Image (cartoon, rainbow, N blue to C red):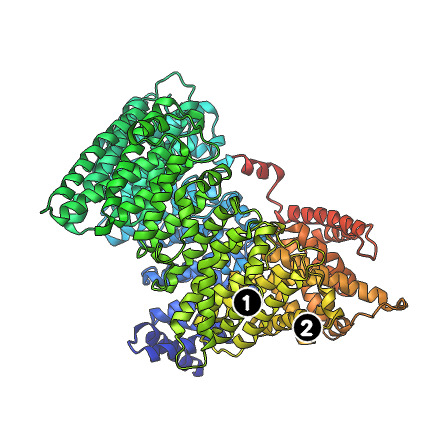
Amino acid sequence: MADEQEVRQLELLCKQLYESSDSAQRAEAEKALVSFQNSPDTLSKCQLLLDRGDSCYAQLLAATTLTKLVSRSAQGLSLQQRVDIRNYVLNYLATRPKLPNFVIQALVALFARISKLGWFDNDKDEFVFRNVVTDITKFLQGSVEHCMIGVQLLSQLTCEMNQISEADANRSLTKHRKIASSFRDTQLFEIFRLSCTLLGTARENCKSLNFNDEGQHGLMTQLLRLAHNCLTFDFIGTSTDESSDDLCTVQIPTSWRPAFLDFTTLKLFFDLYHSLPNTLSPLALSCLVQIASVRRSLFSNTERAKFLTHLVNGVKHILQNPQGLSDPSNYHEFCRLLARLKSNYQLGELVMVENYPEAIQLIAKFTVQSLQMWQFAPNSVHYLLSLWQRMVASVPYVKATEPHLLETYTPEVSNAYITSRLESVAVVVREGLEDPLDDLGMVQQQLEQLSVIGRCEYQKTCTLLVQLFDQAARAYQELMASPNAQQIDVTIQEGRLTWLVYIIGSAIGGRVSFNSNDEHDAMDGELVCRVLQLMNLTDSRLAQGGCEKLELAMLSFFEQFRKIYVGDQVQKNSKVYRRLSEVLGLSDESMVLSVFIRKIITNLKYWGRSEPIISKTLQLLSDLSVGYSCVRKLVKLEEVQFMLNNHTSEHFPFLGNSVAVSEMRCRSMFYTSLGRLLMVDLGEDEDRFDNFMLPLTAAFESIGTMLASAETPLFAAEEAKKALIGLSRDLRGLAFAFNTKTSYMMLFDWIYPNYTPILLHAVELWYHDPQVTTPVLKLFAELVQNRSQRLQFDVSSPNGILLFREASKVICSYGSHILNVEVPKDQIYPMKLKGISICFSMLKAALCGSYVNFGVFRLYGDEALDNALNTFVKLLLSIPQSDLLDYPKLSQTYYVLLECLAQDHMSFLSTLEPRVFLYILSSISEGLTALDTMVCTGCCATLDHIVTYLFKQLTQKGKKTRRGVPTASDMFLQVLELHPEILQQILSTVLNVIMFEDCRNQWSMSRPLLGLILLNEEYFNQLRENIIRSQPPDKQAAMLQWFDNLMEGIERNLLTKNRDRFTQNLSMFRRDINDSLKGPNMTAASVSDMMTS
C-alpha cells in the first residue's frame, strides 16, 4: 500500500514538473525526482509506474530513469534483470501501441541503449541481445502503429550504435567500436534491406496511401529515417565531424555491393522523391546524397560508369520535372546532391556519360535560375558554386575524348552570380531587407568559389566586370556631382560598387601561378586601375563622410592584390604593372606600395571611429611589414618615414584617449608593424631609437606624474588608466617586433629602471581591474620571452637577473592582491583566472629562457626566485581543481609551467607542503585524461620527472651520501608513504589509457609508466591479476603472456637504454591487446575490406 501511495506521489510530481506554471514548484518537483532516480529501489518503482500507466509523464520518467540505470556501469544490473527489462519494454510497446509519441521515444531509446550495452553478453552460448530483427519483425506485421514502433526501434538502435554517448565516452572508445563493428557486420545490412523492402512496398501502394493521415505519414517518415541512418552509419570508425559536409565519402562494406550494383536501390529513392509529398521527399533526397557518395572502390571502372549514368539520369529527370524543387528543403538537398556529383566522381567520368551534354545544360540553367532568385534558400548556393568550382578546377587534368562544354556554360554562371548580386542591392536598400554583405563569412566563401569559376573564359568575366564597373562608377560620380541627389540612390550605387570591388578582388585572387598568362594579367591591370581610381574619388570625399562597407571591400581587394602581385615571389615585369603605369603612372612596385601606405594612413586618420576598418587596415600593414624585400622598399618611402616620426593621436586618432578601451587592442599590431619597419635601418643608432620613442616617453612621464598624485583628490584616475592601457599595448607590440639583441637592449635600457616602477605602481593600484592588469601583465610576459634568442646578455651584465627581479615583483604584487579579491562564479575567468594564467606564462617564459642562472639567487640570499615560486603556489591553491581543465587557456599555461618546474626546479617542488604536492599530483592525474593532447603530453613529461626523482631518492636512501653533498628533502617520500593510493591511481589511469583507449601519444605515456611500475611493484602485480581475471577464460593465458612480454628484459633502473626497451615492449603490448579487442568477428579479411576506400 505504501508503495502505491509513493507511486501516486511520483505521478503528481511528474505532473507538477511538466505542467505547473509556478517555477518554484517545478524546481521542487525536479529536486524530488532526481533524488528518486538515485534511490536504491528505483527499479521496482519504475515497473509499478509503467504497469499503472495512469500518467504519460510518469511513464516518461520511468523510461528515462531505467535508461540511466542501465547506463551506469558501477551499480550494474544482473544479466537476467537486463534481459527482463528488454523483453518487458517490447511487450509493453506491443500491447500499448497508442502511447503518446514522447513516451514511445523514451521506451525505444531504453531498448536501444540496453541492446547496445549488452551486445556481447551471452547466456548458454547465445548472444541474448542480438535477436533484434526477429523480435522486431513481429511489430512490422501488425497495425500501422505497431509497424511504426518497429521501424522506430530499428532506427534508434542504428543511431545508438553509431553514437558515442556520454556513458561510452567515460568507458572505452575501443569497446564502442567493437560493438559498432559487430553490429555492422551482423545486422546492419539486413536492416537496410528490410527498410528498402518496406519502402518498395510503399512505392507500389503510393496511390492508395493517404499522406494526410498522421499514422501513414509518420510511418513513411520513420522508414526514410531508418534508411538514412543505415547510410550515414560510421562504417570504419572515423567518426567524422558532422558539420564538415563537403568531402564526405560513405565507406560502404564490400558485402553491400549487390544493393548498389543492380541500381534498384538508386531507382527506389528517385521514384520515392517523385511520388511522395514535399513533407517527405527531402528525406528521400538526403538518402540519395549518401548513395551518390558511396566510396569509389566499391565499383570497378565499368560498374562505376553505369552507376554514374543512372545517377545523372535521375538528376536530369528531376531537373526536367522541377516542380518539387520549389520546396526549400527539397531544393537544399538537391543542391547537396549536385555537389556530390563532382566531389565523388571525376570530370573525365562525368563527360563520358551518354546524356552529359543535356544534363550539364540543365544543371547550368538550374544554377543560373537559383542565383537569380538570390532571396530563396541562400544557404544552398554554396553547394551549387562548389560543383562548378570543382569542375572548372579539374579542366586542366581531363584526358577524355568527349567535350566538357564548360567554356559554354561557366560564363553564364559567373554572369548570373555577378548581375544578381548587383540587382539585389536596390531591393535590399528600398525594402530594408537584411543585407547579404553583413554576413561577410558567407560572402567570402562564395567569392573564393567564384574566383575559380570566373577564371574559366576569364576574358568574358573581365569584360563583364569592366562594363558593369564603368556604369556604376559613372552613375556614382554623377550623383556625387549633383547637388540634389537622393541619399537612397547614393546608398544603392555604393552597394553596387561594394559588390564589384569584392568580386574584382576575388577575381584577381583566383590567379594561379602555374596557369597564368600575360593576357589575363593585362586584364587584371584593367580591373586594378578602376578600383584605384574609385579609391581616389572616395578618399577625396572622406572629410564629408564615407561608406564603411565600401572601405572594407577596398581593404579586401588590397589584401588579394598584395597576395598576388606584391611581395617576394612576384614577377615584377607583370603586365599588371604595365597597365598601371599607362593609366595611373605607377611604374614599379615601390610606387604601388606608396599607394598602399597612403591608403593605410588615410584610413587610420579618418576611420578611427570604425573598429573593423582600423583592424583590417592594421592587418594589411602588418602583412606588408613581414616580407623581406617588401619591408626594405617600404622603409625608403616618405609615407613610411612620416609614420615612424609622427605616431601620435594628432595624426592617428585611434591612438588617442577618447577611444573605447575595447578598441585599443589593435594598437599592439600597429606598433609591431612600426617596430619591424624601424628595425630595418636601426642598427645601433640609439639617437634614432630615442627619437622614435619620444611620444611613448612623453606618455610614460605624464602617467608617472598622474600616479604620483594618486592619493590626492586631484588624481584623474580614468585618464591615467586609459593612457596606461594604451601605452602597455603599444610597448607590447614593440617588444614583440624587437627580436634582435641590439634592438631589445635599447628597449630594455629605455624601460628599466626608469619606467618599470610606474607599471608596478599601476598593478598595485588597479589590481582588481583586468582592463589594466591584462595589458600590463602581457607586456611583462613579452619582455621576459627569449624570442629568437634576443636575451643573450654579456658576461659582465646583470640584466638577466634584473629582468627576472622585475617580473618577480610584478607576479608577487599582482598575486598577493588578487588572492583577496572575491568575484562571482560566472566572472571568475575574466576577473581573476585570466590574470593568473598570464602570470603562469610569464613565470614559465622567465624560467625556461636560459638567460638567468637561478642557483645564484639562493647563493646570495636574493628572494626574487623563492617569492615568485611561492606566489605561484598560493595562486594555484586558490584555483578549484575543476577550473584548471575547464578553462583551456589556464590549463595550457599551468601544465606547461608545471613541466618546466619539474624539469629544472625539482628541489623547490620537493620542499612543498604535503597538501600542495598532493594537489599537484591530482591535477596531473586529471590532466592525463584531458581532451587536449598538449596538456596530456605535458602531464606525462612532468610525471616522468617526478617519478624519476622519487626513484632516485629511494635508491639513494640506502647508500651513504657523499660528503659535502647536501641531502635533498625527502618530504616527497614521506607523503607517498602516507598516501600510496595517489601514484597507484595514476599508474592504473596510464595503463588503462594505453590498453583500452584511443591513446594519441603513446610514446609520452610510456615514459613515466616504467617508473610508476618500479615504484609500485606490488600494486602493479595486483592490477595485472585483476585485468587477467576480468578477461573471458579463453583469453586469460594470452593476456598473461602479453604482460610477461611487457616486462621481458627490463631491469630495475631508469637508464635511457632500459626505458627505450620498455617503450618498444609497450608498443607490442598495445598492438596485441588492440588486435584482440577488435573481437572475434572482425577477421583480417573483413578489416582490410573495410579500409579499402
Depicted 682 relative to depicted 97: above or below: above
Kindly report the distance in space between the C-alpha atoms of the residues bearing marks 2 and 1: 19 Å
Q: Name the residue nearer the viewer: 258 or 1067.
A: 1067
Q: Quadrant of residue 465?
A: top left
Extreme-left residue of the structure: 484
Q: Amino acid at mark 2?
A: Glu
Mark 2 residue element: loop
Residue at the disc numbered 1: 756
Residue 513 or residue 1025, whichever sits in front: 513
Query: Left or right: where does residue 445 sit relative to residue 807?
Result: left
Amino acid type of disc 1? Thr
* Point 36% across, 58% down: residue: 649
- Residue 65 x %, y %: 45, 68
The extreme front residue here reads 687
Q: Which mark is residue 118?
A: none
Most foreground residue, 467 or 610: 610
Circle 2 is placed at which residue position?
A: 863
Q: Residue at x 46, y 50 (%)?
A: 674
Q: Determine the residue located farthest toward the bottom in the rendered image.
A: 2
Label 2–label 1 contact, CB within 8 A: no
Residue farthest toward the top in the current orientation of the protein: 401
Q: Position of residue 802 (x, y in %)?
A: 64, 65
Q: Secondary structure at mark 1?
A: helix
The answer to whether residue 192 is left or right of residue 940 is left
* Residue at 57 percent of width and 69 percent of height: 810
Badge 1: few (under 14), some or many (20 or more) residues near its Cα, within 10 Å?
some
For the question of whether residue 134 can be seen, the reply is no
